[in-house]
Amino acid sequence: MNPKNFNRLFFVPIQGAGLSHSAAAEIFNKDEERTDWHDETLWFVREKRDKAVKQISEWEQLRTLGSDIKDHTLSNLDIYLAEFEKNAQANGIKIHWAIDAEEHNEIILGIIREQKVQQVVKSKSMLTEECHLNDYLAQRGIDVIDTDLGERIVQFRNEPPSHIVLPAIHLKKQDVSETFHEHLGTEKGNNDPQYLTEAARQHLRDKFIKSQLAITGVNFAIASTGGFVVCTNEGNADMGAHAAKIHVASMGIEKIIPKVEHLGVFLRLLARSATGQPITTYSSHFHQPRVGQQMHIIIVDNGRTKQLGRPDFRSSLKCIRCAACFNTCPVYRRSGGHSYHTAVAGPIGSILNPNLDMKANADLPFASTLCGSCSNVCPVKIDIHVQLYKWRQVLVAEGFTTGGKKVAMKGMAFVLSHPSIYRISGKIGRWIMRVFPFIFNNKSFNPWYKQREMPEAPEQSFRDWYKKNKK
Amino acid sequence: MNSREKILGAISINKPSLIELPVIDIKSTSSLSVDWVDEFIKTLESIGGKVVQLSSIDLIKLEIQEAKLRGEYIVNTLPVLGEVNNEINPTMEASLLESIDRAYIEGSIGVAENGSVWLYENQIKNRLLPFICQHLVICLNINKIVPNMHEAYQQVDVAKEGYGVFLAGPSKTADIEQSLVIGAHGARSLLVYLIS
């Protein structure tokens, strides 16, 4: 048994309130047909990414540039944020700073109350998901309408998005049809995506026109000009921001890029990595509020400065949220986004979330085979699988894994560092597998057996075979 | 200490020592023999847009007149195409713009590698116009096509006006089972007239 399998057997992370990734994934896997569909659909997106990438001969050069620009920016982040603030203010944009999710939410609530706003629309922003803004505002009597189609679908269903680019990827069209029948009065049993999308278009047009305040995310904020870029395919960020009297854009501190010319690199990387499109339909550049409009930007920390202080993990802040690592991940594809119980799921989420809450998210770095496919597709070259591995070390050292795990690892370390004991254990193991196979071929004793057949135990070890056959 | 000072202070303590900013030295894509107009057309049509090359704008003028006779609400923003719709201004409300069937807008440059067109705020008259109209028509000088985004950003000044957009094709979504649907929230179609 190699050490990786050993991890799978004995590493049971301590879990917070909800289900751990592995427990939630087990439920997800019960519907085999749907799991296969989910797996294939995301792989299809990964293949589209590959096709788009291969059309650019300088792709690897672009990745290196993207990575290096982000590395530079993080090493000078305070200076760039101050520069951005100054330029944005000169453009007539109001800047707010939020140390954490709560302060971010309070700032938005403050604007809503001060301006006596009743109708709020929001386009996709993973930061507002991370801050649980919708719940916070709902508890205070303010309903936020999510306007991205996928997000509206999951909002109707009281579910969080399961993917940062494709929020409703865990659902089939029948599910959407049922949801829309219930909430929008569409024909029962009409599962045509065209028909369903049209119903959402009509429903949300009305919301856009009536909205007084629009919340958007930020894809890139340009230090040298004090402007920001928002990318969508549907046009919902623009419909919201241009129709409402107040535009509030929320951004993490890591969204900064130094200059306009850097957009050329990142816009070439983003959509190709995300969905295989050459660019999103709309790449909107906001520099000033329109006549009579108020524009606010909230710059949010929420643990990011802490991550910046962890040399092993700081490069996770280079992420541009394309989700290429989700689509390629064999664990994500077969466990679904909700199993990760966090706003940002997938491999990148699994290295961002332990920083936010080590105890609650101690299971996530173990939700990986460490195959490295995530790092290979990352447009800004984050060494995701290496960081997943490093988080495991940190979580064990900090005591966020169960006692059994520690004992098991210590035992394993002892066995592996004593060759004679290793050889004897191997012999005993092979003997037990042959004589008492039920001990291994048993789902209660051996979780590794759940979705797999155990191999037949060989008569002898490779070492014995080699000794006999060399010459 | 307020949040701004706390955040900036934490960054200055936690950031790594300064790493140099790289120079963007991307050479113009692949071979120089590529016909960028062809490339632009091919790319834009692959993402749902339609492109028509014209040597005279008379055809567009005629098309506008005919549509108006049919009773459609057509918005023209280009003086060369005839009467412009002066009612469209930066503060016009969404509820009034919503009834626009088709809008004619001038584009600044086209980008061959991704089929996008840059629109300045003064070209769209009202920020909502290219999104809220049912169908969008962009008129673009055929000599204004650049190979890639690096050259695009050298040609446009994104901070010159309050707003600008790279627009590539009609509004679309694949949020229901990855089935591509054209016409999500923005325009249902995009037609680009390349005018020589």
Image: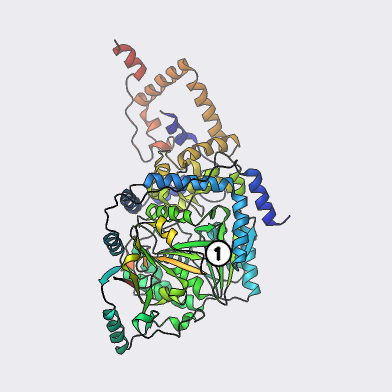
Q: Tell me the quadrant of the picture where the N terminus of chain A can be found.
A: top left
User: Given the current orientation, which residue lies at the most extreme top position?
Assistant: A471
Chain under numbered label 1: A
The amino acid type, in three-letter code, at marker 1 is Ala
Which residue is at 32% across, 15% downward?
A: A466
Residue behind mark 1? A249
Counting from the top left corner in percent of width and height, residue A291 is at 55, 76
Residue drawn at x 30%, y 82% as measured from the top left: B61
Residue at (28% x, 69% y) in the render: B50
In this view, A328 is above or below B149: above
**Which corner quadrant holds the C terminus of chain A?**
top left
* Residue A9, image quadrant: top left
Q: Vertical placement of A216 versus A75: above or below?
A: below
- From the viewer's perspective, is residue B13 above or below residue A271? above
Residue A272 lies left or right of residue B51; in this view the side is right
Secondary structure beneath label 1: strand
**Can see residue A191?**
no
